Amino acid sequence: MPIVLTGIVPHPPILLESIGKEHRDKLKSTLASFQELNQELLKNKVDTIIVISSHAPQISRSFVLNLGKLENNEMIYQADFEDLGDFKTKFTWKPDIYLSYKIKSYLETRAPLQLVNQDKLDHGSAISLTLLSAGLEDCQVLSLSPSDLDGEAHWQLGRLLKEIFSNEDKNIAIFATGDLSHRVDETLNTEQLNFDTQLLRYLEQGQGQEIAKWDLEFVKQHSACIYQPLLIMLGLLEDYQWKFIKLSYEAPFGVGYLSGYFKLH
Ligand SMILES: [Zn+2]
């Protein structure tokens, strides 16, 4: 099976040792989940990790695939955390150019997709990849952005990606990276359950379709940057029998951080 792992991870900068320092302790469970997912990636000999982040480059009415930038005759992605006050930590990854063109040509008449060339990855992708790809030196990466299109368009993109990936010989892992509600500590409107509680319940009950029905205003109120990447993931999983395995959920700073993966049958 070419899709070897599909998961959800958060991306608070304090997960990185150089930034989080002693505050990292407050996200112990999340860090342990990243380690577990990293072990799974190593065990499954993953060739390519696709990371879907709402903070990656945006183009109106289109999804975006970033191919990195040419440097010393090869395409690369770079990650640094200077915006977050860390001037030392730097990483590079190689984009999977082969797969990006496969995606581009398959989507040509099926979904709006634009290619861009930016070497620097957004912080969501960079933090997730730093923790997920430890020890995976030969692994390639692709950075995909959701769009301002509706939920159905995201779901449909997921379906199409599944059609592409299931015909590949490579071992592919896909991660939706994002935080859940930024209002975990607030007393919410009693008409609606807490965003995170509902999301987790639907995931654990295998009811992805229910999540797709959510009003975008509700999502916006919670500033949950996981939502669109998650819809792509759920569309991709539509034809599978899946069970969501929660590895951790914590919200020590009032923002929900969920880590887990979809066990495929
Ligand atoms: Zn975010």
Image (cartoon, grey):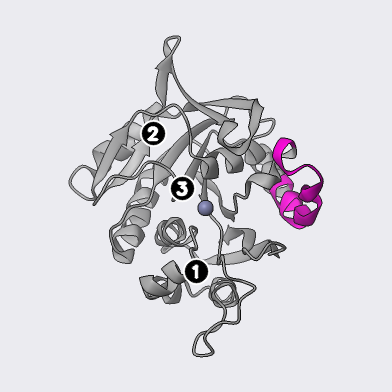
Q: Residue furthest left?
A: 109
From which residue to which does the magenta span run?
18-35
- Of mark 3 and mark 2, the one earlier in the sequence is 3
Residue 95 at x, y = what percent? 45, 28
Amino acid type indicated by mark 2: Leu
Distance, label 3 to label 1, CA atoms, is 19 Å
Residue assigned mark 1 = 222
In this image, 34 relative to 182: left or right? Answer: right
Question: Disc 1, ligand 1: is the CB inside 8 Å?
Answer: no
Under circle 2, the secondary element is helix
Crowding near pointer 3: few (<14 within 10 Å), some, many (20+)? many
Q: Position of residue 63 (x, y in %)?
A: 31, 47
Above/below status of 162 relative to 150: above
The residue carrying mark 3 is 52
Residue 23 colored magenta? yes
Crowd class of label 1 (few under 14; some 14 to 19; many from 20; radius 10 Å): some
Judged by its main secondary structure, the magenta piece is: helix
The three-letter code of the residue at mark 3 reads Ile
In the rendered structure, the answer to whether residue 13 lies left or right of residue 95 reads right
- The alpha-carbon separation of the residues under discs 2 and 1 comes to 34 Å
Q: Amino acid at mark 1?
A: His
From the viewer's perspective, is the residue at label 3 or at label 1 nearer? Answer: 1
Residue 185 lies, with reference to residue 90, above or below; the image says below
Q: Quadrant of residue 256?
A: bottom right
Residue that mark 2 sits on: 99
